[in-house]
Amino acid sequence: MSFFRERRDFSGDPLYNPFERPSMPLASLALDGVLGTGGNNDSGEPVDPEKGLAIPTAYRCVAIISTVLAGLTLEEIQPDGDAERWTVLDNLDSYTAFECKEFIGARLAGWGNYFAKKIGSRGKWQGPGDTLRDLIPYPGNDVKVVRVRGVKTFRVRKRNDDGSAYTDPSQPNLPVYEDITDGPLCPVFHIPGLGFDGLQGVSPILLAARTFGTSIAADKLAARFYSRGQQLGGILKVKAPLASQSQADGIKMNWRNSHSGIRNAGDVAILDSETDFQAITIAPEALQFLQSREWQAWEVAKMLGIPAWMVQPNTTWGTGVESQNEGFVSYTMRSYSDRTEERFTRDFGTRGKPLEFDLDRLLRGNMTERFQAYGQGIGWGWLLRSEVRKKERMKPLDTKFGLEEPLQVQSMNGALADGPMNTPPIPGAQPASAPAPVDPTQEDDKTSD
């Protein structure tokens, strides 16, 4: 919509009157034509995971999930309960362990599924017992999971060596798919997110297409608002109709040259009787969409399971943040870590040695709280000092220091409790002396009256 709506006089020459409809609210100009048509939601903006991640809050939420998952250590649990780092992901040809886990988190949070091609020691995946050499993620939406005659099947889009889509020469506009049956020899590695058909997960962004579409539309509205909708400083009202657009442009340029710039700030303008100047201010109700954008950001974070204190810029991290972090790990990250470790165990693990992520680093408190807990565990004998050094990633000490032996627990009166432990008491403790033995032959010195 333009301020200058063309009219023509009786001779056919154009006349321009910028104020043909003075009753129209200026704020409505910023809202004109913002929302598009079509799309997969009521907002009119088509939504897919890539467009959804263009929303800053959505990108930050997915980045938090993926980087936290990538920073966790995947460990192999031995039959005796000891945990050792699983080094298979450290030896991939194309990716580091961090990059591989980060991509898994991003795909699960944004697309709802992670699909990758297994590369074995000889190239083609040979099934259980083969050494995983690489995991090559499938691009975009190249894989769909279907049931063919009741069997779970991966429908994979075929691509040429250069990555371009392979098409049938007889039908060049239609992509070609290959069906791969699931099983031990299947080269497709799939981690499904939350889904409803038992085959594959659903993208949270697509499930909340209306919320994400509204947020995208609000971004466009903001861009139009600041770029063209409400950037006028004022209006020069000319009572006589202008003969041409060039005459209107000349008046505008003369006004700019005379009154714009720092040197003219605070100056006084002198106008003739045919011209008026009207300053434009933005009505508060025209800015309510800014509040709606804040609400949409919270809706996006809620959909992806990210607490507000992680994405709001004005949030102060302080008292209670450890408890909130525990809730984030328990109710958000566990949904990603558990399904990932179980799939790795199922496809690449050794029988009897499950794979688990080490979540202790996310859940442990500050240094003072940890040391107090360690002291209590060591003092009561159920925690070894060598275990504490291992938890704190400290170098183990020689066995001559006796850190592999539990300290004996002291009873309430200070005496050492009975038990199989023969190690010294807690350093610094002053055990009370044992009571003198009672002579059973000695008579009671109390006499009756």
Image (tube, helix red, strand yellow):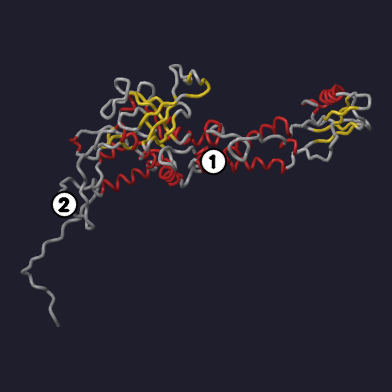
**In this orientation, does residue 388 appear?**
yes
Identified by mark 2, the residue type is Gly
Q: Tell me if residue 97 comes above or below residue 409 in the rendering.
A: above
Going from the N terminus, do you reach mark 1 or mark 2 first? 1
Q: Tell me if residue 186 comes above or below residue 24 in the rendering.
A: above
Badge 1: residue crowd in 10 Å (few <14, some 14–19, many ≥20):
some
Quarter holding the C terminus is bottom left
Residue 107: percent from the left, percent from the top?
45, 32
- Position of 401 with respect to 3 (left or right) is left
Residue 287: percent from the left, percent from the top?
69, 40
Residue at 92% across, 30% down: 240
**In this orientation, does residue 64 appear?**
no
Residue carrying label 1: 208
- Position of 360 with respect to 253 (left or right) is left
Residue carrying label 2: 419
Identified by mark 1, the residue type is Ala
Residue 15: percent from the left, percent from the top?
88, 27
Residue at 22% across, 58% down: 413
In the structure shown, which secondary structural element does the residue marked by tag 1 occupy? loop
Residue 209 versus residue 285: which sits nearer the camera?
Answer: 209
